[in-house]
Image (spheres, grey):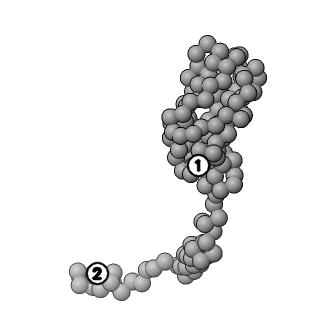
Amino acid sequence: MTLKETVSAKLSETRAVSPVIGVILMVAITVILAAVIGTFVMGLGNNVSKNAQAGVSFDQNATAVDIQLTSMGNVNDVASFSLNATGSCSDISSASFNDVGDIVTTTDCSAGDKITVTASIDGEKNVIATYTSN
């Protein structure tokens, strides 16, 4: 067999993906495209609620714990923040922040007492930070 005949034989061979594999690939691509287009059309991504994000720091000195608002994040109003202390800590549920940098202090805390700062955004409460006293 000459070189010309060998090349002609190789070029004339018809090798491709089997029809079954081709159909499976086309159906898979169609399903994926339909899912992506359906998500955009129905706006499923718009129904996701936002979580409140803000910065709070805690500083404990003996039995007193200072809670400082360090940043507002995506919370629009300082009135959206609420404070709660459990255990023997003094009640801070009526205390509030007036601005970034404000400090609220709770006293008489024992080891294991918890202090929780929450914020409301879009009507839903989110825990911003939790502190366990030493």
Residue in view at x 59 percent, y 19 percent: 60
Neighbour tally class for label 2: few under 14, some 14-19, many 20 plus, Cα within 10 Å = few
Residue in view at x 59 percent, y 77 percent: 41
Residue in the foreground of this view, choosing between 42 and 16: 42
Q: Provide residue 23's location: percent of width, then percent of height.
A: 57, 80
Q: Provide residue 89's location: percent of width, then percent of height.
A: 72, 22
Amino acid identity at mark 2 = Thr
Q: What residue sits right under mark 1 in the picture?
A: 77
Residue in the foreground of this view, choosing between 80 and 110: 80
Q: Is residue 118 visible?
A: yes
Q: What residue sits right under mark 2 in the picture?
A: 6
Neighbour tally class for label 1: few under 14, some 14-19, many 20 plus, Cα within 10 Å = some
Residue in view at x 61 percent, y 29 percent: 104
Residue in the foreground of this view, choosing between 134 and 61: 61
Q: How many marks?
A: 2
User: Sequence-wise, which precedes: disc 1 or disc 2?
Assistant: 2
Quarter of the figure that contains the C terminus: top right
**As drawn, 31 above or below 69:** below
| For the residues bearing labels 1 and 2, Cβ distance under 8 angstroms | no
Q: Provide residue 57's location: percent of width, then percent of height.
A: 54, 30
Query: As drawn, which residue projects farthest toward the left?
Result: 3
Disc 2 element: helix
Residue in view at x 63 percent, y 75 percent: 42
Query: As drawn, which residue projects farthest toward the front?
Result: 98
